[in-house]
Amino acid sequence: MSTMNPDKEIITSNKANDIETFYEIRVLPHFHLGKDTIRWQGHSELDIDSSVHYFAQSSYEYILAFQDHGEIRHSQIEGNAIAPYQTAVLQRPKNGDLPYVEIRRHDNKYIPDITGYFMLFRVET
């Protein structure tokens, strides 16, 4: 079963492979993920500043949410990124203090889809 909301435009392309590799190496390990095979399923834009990336690992489906400034509201995920019969459960990063992981450059230069805030949600039906 796919986690992707059928009403949202889903983009799948080979150009995404580089960014997905970055996420596997630099972002997902913060959430205790990345050692098992990840099957990327696509991504979509929530708005001008945020996007979601759909993937599966083992028997679970996930949404990696990106926001360039601040955390993503749970309602953005449940209202836009998943089907109405699904629930998004926030997965806390290893540090556990904050619900997100912030990725920054040493010079604070902005890079789209890389520098910003990431939150992970497990999708349940």
Image (spheres, rainbow, N blue to C red):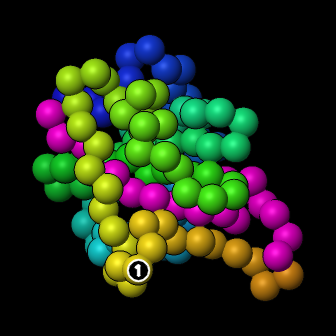
- Counting from the top left corner in percent of width and height, residue 17 is at 56, 51
Where is residue 82 drawn, in percent x and y? 35, 30
The span picked out in magenta is 108-125
User: Is residue 55 part of the magenta span, yes or no?
Assistant: no
Residue 83 versus residue 51 in the image, above or below: above
Left or right of 108: which side holds 122?
A: left
49 vs 78: above or below = below
Let me know if residue 119 is in the magenta part.
yes
Residue at figure coordinates x 41%, y 80% from the top left: 97
Residue at mark 1:
97
Number of numbered labels in the structure image: 1
Observer able to see residue 72: yes
Q: Image quadrant for the C terminus?
A: top left
Res. 17 in view:
no
Q: Is residue 53 left or right of residue 112?
A: left
Residue ID at (14%, 50%): 59
Q: Is residue 115 above or below residue 6?
A: below
Report the residue at 60% width, 33% height from top.
45
Which residue is more in the foreground, 76 or 125?
76
The quarter of the rendered structure image containing the N terminus is top left
- Residue 86 appears at what percent x and percent y? 23, 31
**Where is 32 relative to 23, above or below?**
below
Q: Quadrant of residue 69?
A: bottom right
Q: What type is the residue that disc 1 sits on?
A: Asp
Residue occupying the far top of the picture = 7
